[in-house]
Amino acid sequence: MSDWDPQLYNRFRRYRAEPVEHILSRLQLAGDENEKIIDLGCGSGENTLELARRSPRGSALGVDGSPAMIEAARKLLDGEPAGLKARVSFELLDVPEFRADRAYTLIFSNATFHWIPDKPALFAACFDALRPGGTIVVQMPANETETAKMEIGRLARQAPWNTMLGGREHAFHEEPPEFYAAMLARLGYDRIDCYHLTFHHPMDRPADVVQWYRSTGLRPFLDALPKDRHDEFLAQLTARLNSAYGTSGPMTFDFKRLFIWGRRPGT
């Protein structure tokens, strides 16, 4: 798949930050020199920096499989005070390859686990990477039945797109909170809390929802299409959303997300 576009992804930075704000509202950090934080799928680094700010003497590492995102994160870090820069670093790493042995007090991930096919293996690796008493908190999109996602699938199944896409559908099956609660329990986690929250994002028009997905859920489709057909596909999708939402003007984009909390037992 093509590399991520940090500028396009951050076009809706304010809305994408809302689930992180929810996490931060209940996250308890020690803030001492023993605190070791890792942000799996750190993107352009804003969340990694905020976690480090909230742990005044702790350290934070952000990792991501996108060279463009890591470059953006390092540029962002360059503009921070020296004291913060000394406690934060960014590294290129494909998240499924993450391995560590009791190294971290907090494993944080915003949206990235959604893109990982073998989630049980990654949660198992995270358990191994946590220190006793350490916390994991993961947020993933859970909006497969939302209007725009349904319309993307319907358009992809129609000619001529179905032929060009080779029957490609959105490849990430979403499991309910109960599935993840049971999985984490089997892996040995305790203090497990898994739940859905829906965020309500005002948009100027349905075309903005198309732009939202261009940087995320539409990437596999656009990668599979010839570049000279991208504009046509996006125009047809925009027309479908105007009809499905019943407007070409202001509307609310409802986005459901899954939150997963757990802890490695111990002190």
Image (cartoon, grey):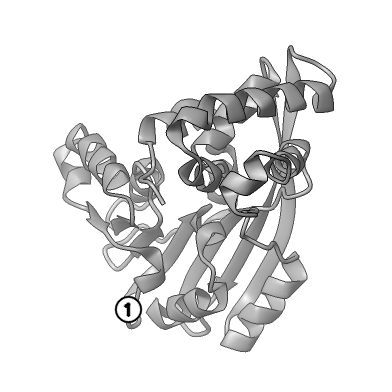
Residue sitting at x 22%, y 42%: 74
Q: Amino acid at mark 1?
A: Ala
Residue 144 seen anywhere in this rendered image of the structure: yes
Q: Position of residue 7 (x, y in %)?
A: 38, 29
Q: Position of residue 130 (x, y in %)?
A: 41, 77
Count all numbered tags in the image, as a single digit. Answer: 1
Would you identify the image quadrant in which residue 260 lies?
A: bottom right
Location of mark 1 (residue): 100
- Toward the viewer: 208 or 229? 229
Instruction: Name the residue nearer the viewer: 218 or 127.
Output: 218
> Looking at the image, is 155 positioned above or below residue 134?
above
**At 39% across and 42% down in the image, what residue appears?**
4
Determine whether the residue tagged by mark 1 lies in a helix, strand or loop: loop
Q: Outermost residue toward the top? A: 249
Please state if 117 lies on the left or on the right of 257 as rendered: left
Towards the viewer: 3 or 136? 3
